[in-house]
Amino acid sequence: MSLLSYSTEGKIGYVTLTNDKQRNALSLQLIHEFEALLLEIRKAQEINVLVIQAEGKVFSAGHNLREIDGHETQEVLHLFNECHRFMETLRNMPQVTQPLLNHRL
């Protein structure tokens, strides 16, 4: 099951976090799906703006603590390294990126 959806409207791309049940927590699965999607979007010259939004009341609860608590240090470091790479990909997007928090820009 995908934790994201993507749609476009004109020159605007919309990424929606769709795991409201887990408060859109940054799991390793979400990080990998999101980064792969960003790498595709960055090639889309017809998209000028990327809006990031979420289903539910919470944009994102942060890291999924179930993937941190009780795990070996190396596993946690792997998660944080993957997240760092994802955040750098997001930060370096050629499109303007805008989060939509509480359903408002």
Image (tube, helix red, strand yellow):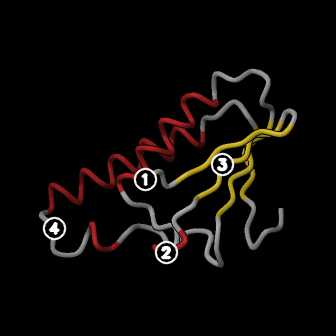
Mark 1–mark 4 CB contact (< 8 Å) = no
- For the residues labelled 3 and 1, the Cα–Cα distance comes to 16 Å
- For the residues labelled 2 and 1, the Cα–Cα distance comes to 13 Å
- Nearer the observer: mark 3 or 2; the answer is 2
**Amino acid bearing label 3:** Val
Sequence-first tag of 4 and 2: 2
Q: Secondary structure at mark 1?
A: loop
Which one is in front, 74 or 48?
48
For label 4, the crowd category at 10 Å Cα-Cα, with few meaning under 14, some 14 to 19 and many 20 or more, is few
The residue pinned by badge 1 equals 1
Sequence-first tag of 1 and 4: 1
Viewport quadrant of the C terminus: bottom right
Residue 76, placed above or below residue 70: above
Residue 7, placed above or below residue 1: above
Mark 3–mark 4 CB contact (< 8 Å) = no
The residue pinned by badge 3 equals 15
Residue 98, placed above or below residue 19: above
Q: Residue at x 77, y 39 (%)?
A: 8
Mark 4–mark 2 CB contact (< 8 Å) = no
**Amino acid bearing label 2:** Lys
The residue pinned by badge 4 equals 71
Residue 2 spot, x, y in % from top left: 47, 51
Quadrant of the rendered structure where residue 20 is? bottom right
- For the residues labelled 3 and 2, the Cα–Cα distance comes to 17 Å
